[in-house]
Each structure stands twice: as C-alpha cells, then as structure tokens.
C-alpha cells in the first residue's frame, strides 16, 4: 500500500451518476480514484492498479458485489467499503461477515463517505507500520527486516540479497497477489531491463529454502494468470 504518496481508491459501481459523485468527493479530499463499471472490470483494475482501498457496490451486472468481495478477500487484505442502497440489516451483517470493513447506505453525505475511508486507511497503515518496525513472524517464517535474518521453522536460513528482497516483498503483501511485473519493480527495481523469467527462477530458489516440499508449495503460491502470493499460515 502507498504510505507517503497519494492514496489510490478503486470505485466499483455501475451507476455512472453516483460513481461520479463518489469520485468527485474523494478527489476533492485528496485521493486518487480509479473507476470500474462492473465487477469483472473491478477485479481487473484491482489486480492492475493495486489500490489502497475499494469502494464497492453490491447490485451490479456481470458479477455482483458479493462475488467481487469474496474474490478480493481470497487475494488481499486491502480495506473494502460497501456503498449500496440495500439497507436491510441482514445485508449489512452479510457484508461485514464477508470481510468488508464498513457498510454505507444511500443516501449518504460527504462525511458519511469520507470518515470510514479515513478510518480504514489509517487502520491499514498502522498495521503496515507495525509489521515494518517489528519484523514479521508466523508459524513457519520469522524475519528481522533490519538485521536481514530469516528463520524457517525456527532454523536459520541463509538467503541471497535478491532472495531476501523477494521474500520480504511477498510477506509484506501477505495473502495478496503480486504480479511478476510488480515483483520485478519491487525486487529488481524499475531500471531492470531483463526478462520476467528471472522472477519465476528466484521464486523457485526461494521455495527450495522455505517450503516443506518445494514441489508442492504451501507458502508461496502461484496464482495462474496473475502472479504469486505468500499464504500466511495460521497454525
């Protein structure tokens, strides 16, 4: 997620008039907005643009908001705010239980839109800063980002600088899909002019050092057609 730079918000909504109202208010508040008119386009924009937050409608053609939310939660922890005309309590509970961070019903004021956006972004930013400052630990892997130390199942593992940067990029975006282009930018830098094949090659190197069985990886998952994801183990 962006930190010091302008935050990007993806607005997935089929009604053009309301979409314009939402994006205008967000733009005036200093956010950079990305728009999508249906669920499928919204998922494409999410994977391509990596927004910091998603504003999502429920009733849409092609793919409804429930389906979009389910798919987003499989690949990302990015905040999702549902903005909809569905006011029934069961819809709100379904949204929150499905992983939405907040549920806003129409009609809404500017503050009713902006306040939960600010809260969700602040919460996400705090989580990132805490992880960045204290390192990372789960039942399989522990990383000290400042000392460049990695423990795999409590055993010290030696990684090359590139392998360390690749693991760090995946873990800092745990449970989120990163494309090969995004990994190339984050690990090798924008000035790198080589082939994308180097990403696949180093993912293979890394799996051999951190997976229990590198031929059936459980930590570093290949998401076909999109890229790679570090699956944070819970036990």
Image (spheres, rainbow, N blue to C red):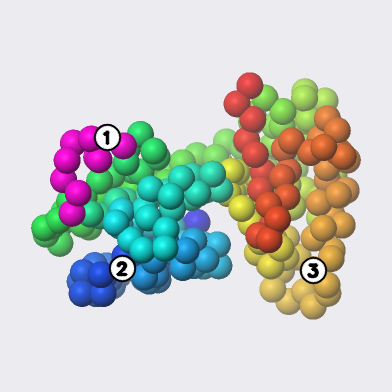
Instruction: Give the residue displayed 52% in from the left and 66% down from the top.
Output: 44
Q: Report the magenta stretch's main SS.
A: helix
Q: Which mark is residue 196?
A: 3
* Percent position of residue 161, x then y: 82, 52
Compute the Cα span from label 2 to label 1.
Answer: 23 Å
Q: Is residue 45 above or below residue 144?
A: below
Circle 2 residue: 14
Q: Is residue 163 above or below residue 34?
A: above
Which of the 4 image quadrants contains residue 210?
A: top right
Instruction: Give the residue displayed 62% in from the left and 35% down from the top.
Output: 232
Q: Is residue 163 left or right of residue 43?
A: right
* Percent position of residue 221, x then y: 72, 45
* Percent position of residue 194, x then y: 83, 74
Q: Which mark is residue 93?
A: 1
Nearer the viewer's eye, disc 1 or disc 3? 1
Instruction: Give the residue displayed 79% in from the left and 38% down from the top.
Output: 217
Question: Dot 1 lies on which element?
Answer: helix
- Do the numbered discs 1 and 3 sit on residues whose CB atoms are within 8 Å? no
Crowding at mark 2 (Cα within 10 Å: few <14, some 14-19, many 20+):
some
* Percent position of residue 66, x then y: 38, 48
Quarter placement of the C terminus:
top right
Question: Dot 2 lies on which element?
Answer: loop
Magenta segment range?
85-94
Q: Is residue 190 left or right of residue 74?
A: right
Q: Which mark is residue 48?
A: none
Compute the Cα span from label 2 to label 3.
Answer: 35 Å
Label located before the other in sequence (1 or 3):
1
In the rendered image, residue 235 lying in the magenta stretch gets the answer: no
- The front one of 25 and 42 is 42
């Amino acid at each position: 997620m962006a930190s010091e730079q302008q935050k990007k918000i993806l607005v997935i909504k089929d009604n053009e008039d309301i979409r314009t109202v939402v994006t205008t208010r967000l733009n005036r508040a200093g956010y950079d907005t990305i728009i999508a008119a249906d669920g499928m386009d919204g998922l494409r924009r999410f994977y391509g643009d990596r927004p910091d937050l998603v504003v999502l409608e429920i009733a849409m053609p092609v793919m409804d908001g429930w389906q979009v939310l389910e798919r987003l939660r499989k690949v990302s922890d990015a905040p999702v705010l549902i903005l909809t005309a569905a006011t029934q309590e069961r819809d709100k509970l379904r949204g929150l239980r499905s992983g939405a961070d907040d549920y806003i019903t129409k009609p809404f004021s500017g503050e009713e839109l902006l306040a939960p956006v600010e809260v969700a972004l602040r919460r996400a930013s705090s989580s990132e800063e805490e992880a960045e400052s204290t390192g990372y630990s789960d039942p399989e892997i522990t990383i000290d980002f400042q000392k460049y130390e990695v423990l795999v199942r409590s055993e010290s593992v030696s990684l090359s600088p590139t392998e360390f940067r690749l693991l760090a990029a995946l873990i800092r975006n745990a449970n989120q899909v990163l494309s090969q282009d995004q990994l190339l930018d984050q690990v090798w830098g924008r000035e790198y002019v080589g082939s994308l094949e180097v990403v696949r090659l180093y993912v293979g190197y890394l799996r051999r050092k951190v997976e229990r069985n590198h031929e059936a990886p459980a930590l570093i998952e290949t998401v076909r057609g999109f890229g790679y994801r570090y699956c944070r183990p819970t036990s």
